[in-house]
Each structure stands twice: as structure tokens, then as C-alpha cells.
Image (cartoon, helix red, strand yellow):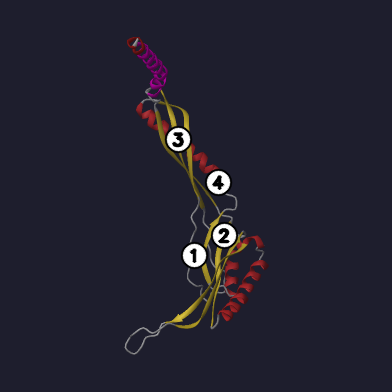
Amino acid sequence: MLRVGFSRALTAATVAAALTAAATAPAFAQETRPREPVITVTGEGRADVAPDMAVVDLGVLKDGKTAREALDANNAAMAEVMKALKDAGIAERDLQTSGFVINPQYQFPQGDNGENKPPVLVGFQVSNMLSVRIRDLARLGAILDQTVTLGANQSGGIRFTNDKPEAAISEARKKAVEDGIARARELTAAAGIDIGKVLEISETSFRPQPVPMMRAAMAKDFAPEAVPVAAGENSYSVTVTMTFALKN
């Protein structure tokens, strides 16, 4: 009886193993199937377009013996600057405070023997920065000159951009795809084979980098003429990675 039971158990285990092997055989065969031959290339496209808007960071820096004195002086000057900007046609939505700082100012005296003495508080400094979108580039120089005349004495930078760059990016995207297809065809033609359908495509886009202006304080004796500016062109770039099937 013991031998019969063992034989039956062994037979059942053998059948189960055989069924498992049969079930997994197609999956294993599928995993080892040779990969479809492909080629992966990158394509690049660029579209140049004149900017239609400038974003200017400017500010007012004022000193005072007390924080209140420095703040009052700064508020008065910034109010004049903002009024001039609005009078020049800059809309409220195009004005945004980008920074506000109150810093104590110290002197660091030294003794007769060169030793450092405790710092002495001598006043306060208030900085108020404003980000301005100027949509009429023809008036950019005159607006900058007027803000300096009215009290703006700090510049954080200027960058020329486009309010709606989608058309330029779309053009760059199409050029990138065309470039990718041309590269794939050139490579496969040299190898004596043909490309098939596109299996995968991905994109990376690059927008223009800001054009920096002098970050130092603006000169108080600024020339009365409008500030000379050159907007140039913005370049929008797109890079695509494309994978093609290869025809046998």
C-alpha cells in the first residue's frame, strides 16, 4: 500500500510539472524572439522670430538714518516711477513687485592697534524691485530713460521675449522632425536598407535665454536721450528623438 501511494503521488507531480512546462513554453519562446531591427536618430529644428515684448527688472534703492526714513524715501520714488509707467501705457497686469528688502547698514571700525571693534549701526537701506512687461518695443528706450529720471537707480536685467511663441515653436518642431527623417534615410541608404514606420518619438524644446543688462546701479547723470536698445531675434529650438523600424 505504501508503494502504490508513493507511485500515485509521483505520477501526479510529474503530470503537474509537464503541464507547467507546457504553459510556460510559449511565453519563454516569445521572450527569446529576436528584436525587430530599428534605428534611433535625433533631429534638430530652429525658428527665429523678432520679439514683441520686453521684460525689464528695475528698482529703487534708498538710504536713511532710520528704517522709516529710508522706506519713506523709497516709497516716494517708487510711486513716481510706477505713475510714469502707467502714464506711458503700461497696464496694471504688466507691473509686478519682484523684490523688497530692508537692510541695516553698519560700519566696522578698527582701534589704534588694528583690532576690530564692535560694528556700529549707521542707517538702513531699502530696495524695491519691479518687474515690468513692455509690449511696445518702440517706446522701450524712452520708458527706461524716464524711469531713471524719476528715481529708478537699480537694474536687474532685461529680456526680450514673445507673448505667444507657439507658432515659432511649432515651426521648429516640424523642422526637427524633417531633420530626423532625413538623417535616418541618409544613414540607412548608406547601409543599403530602408526605414519603415516611426515607432517612437520624443521632444525637448528650448526657449530663448534672458539677455542680461548691467546689474549695477544706474548712473544718476543719465543722458537725456532715450536709452539705446537692440531687440535682435529670439531663437526657439526643438530636438526630437525618433525610432524607426527597418525594412527587411
The residue closer to the viewer here, 82 or 30, is: 30
Q: Which mark is residue 54?
A: 2
Q: Comparing marks 2 and 3, which lies closer to the viewer? A: 3
Kind of residue indicated by mark 1:
Met
Label 2 vs 3, first from the N-terminus: 2
Which amino acid type corresponds to the residue marked 2 in the rendered image?
Ala
Q: Nearer the viewer, mark 3 or mark 4?
A: 3
Q: CA distance from mark 1 to mark 2?
A: 12 Å
**Prevailing secondary structure of the magenta residues:** helix
The disc labelled 4 sits on which kind of residue?
A: Ala
Query: What residue span does the magenta drawing correspond to?
Result: 7-31
**Residue 213: assigned label:** 1
Q: CA distance from mark 3 to mark 4?
A: 21 Å
The residue to which callout 3 is attached is 242
> Regarding mark 3 in the picture, which secondary structure is present there?
strand
Q: Is residue 12 located in the magenta-colored stretch of the structure? A: yes
What crowding class fits label 4: few (fewer than 14 Cα within 10 Å), some (14-19), or many (20 or more)? some
